[in-house]
Image: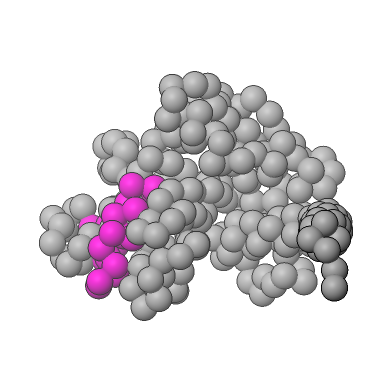
Amino acid sequence: MYSNAYIFRYSAIMVIVAAALLSTAAMLLKPFQERNIAIDKMGGILASAKIPDVSADNAMKLFNEYVEEEIVINQDGEVVDSYSDGKMEDGKAFKIDMKKELYKKSKGEPYELPLYVINKDGKKLYVIPFRGVGLWGPIWGNMALSDDLNTVVGVTFDHKGETPGLGAEITTEMFTKQFIGKKIFNDNNEFKSIVVVKGGISKLPENERIHGVDAISGGTITCNGVNDMINDILVSYLPYLQKNR
C-alpha cells in the first residue's frame, strides 16, 4: 500500500509533466495557429473586394498579388506608414490589432488603423476592416470601397457565436450582397454610413435607400451590432476619406 506522501509526490510530478507537455505543444503549434489566423484575415480582405476563387491554399499568394499597398492612418486621417515593397503580411498595417486600437480610441488616446489598397483589373479598391460587438460576442468584417471612396464594392462579416439561422446570417451572401453599390456619402458629400434597417429599406425615403440594407428577420440585436460597427468604424476613417475623396 502506498503512503499518502508517495501519492502526493506522484500526483505532483504528473501534474508538472502534463503542464510541461501542454506548454510545449502550445509553443510548437503557435506558428501554425498564427499562420491560419493570417490566412483567414487575408481571405476576408480579398473576399470583400470580390477577388475570385480565394481559398486557404492560395490566400497568401493572392493577397500579395492583389494588395499593392498597405496604409496606416492616425485619428486625424494622416498617413503615418505606407508599405508596398515585400511580403504584404510583413507590413505594419497587417500587424495592427484593431481591438487594441479601438480600445485606445474609446479612452480618447491616439490610435492607428489599417487600410488596404487593392489593384483589381487596373482599378484601385480600398478595404476597411471592421470590428464590433454582436449579441453573443465579437463580430468583424471588411468593406471594400471603389476609388471614389464612397461606393461599396463588397463586404464580408464574421462572428464568434451569433445564433445559427438568426444573427449568424450576417455571413451569408443573401445579406452581404445587399451592400454592393451602396454609398456612404450622399450627393451633398455628407457622411451617411450604411444602415441595416429592421423591416426593410422600403421604410426609408426613396433617396435614402442607397444608404440602407434590409435587416435579418429575428436577428435584431446582431443587426444593431452591425449597424454600430459600420458607423463607428467609418467615422474613425472619416478624416482620411474626406481628405482623399
Magenta stretch containing residue 216, yes or no? yes
Q: Residue at x 35, y 59 (%)?
A: 135
Q: Is residue 151 visible?
A: no
Residue 60, located in which quarter of the rendered image?
bottom right
- Type of secondary structure dominating the magenta stretch: helix
Residue lying at 36% horizontally and 68% vertically, measured from the top left: 167
Residue stretch in magenta: 209-230
Residue 221 image offset from top left, x and y in percent? 28, 59
In this picture, is 128 found above or below 104? below
- Residue 122: x and y in percent read 65, 55
Task: Give the percent coordinates (x, y) of residue 191.
Answer: 31, 38
Quarter occupied by the N terminus? bottom right
Check the image and report above or below for 117 versus 172: above
Identify the colour scheme used.
one colour
Magenta stretch holds residue 112: no
Q: Nearer the viewer, residue 46 or 182?
A: 46
* 157 left or right of 179 in image: right
Is residue 135 in view? Answer: yes
Residue at 48% x, 48% y is 131
Q: Is residue 165 left or right of residue 221?
A: right
Where residue 145 appears, as percent x and y from the top left, is: 49, 50
Please indicate whether residue 53 sits to the left or right of residue 9 in the image: left
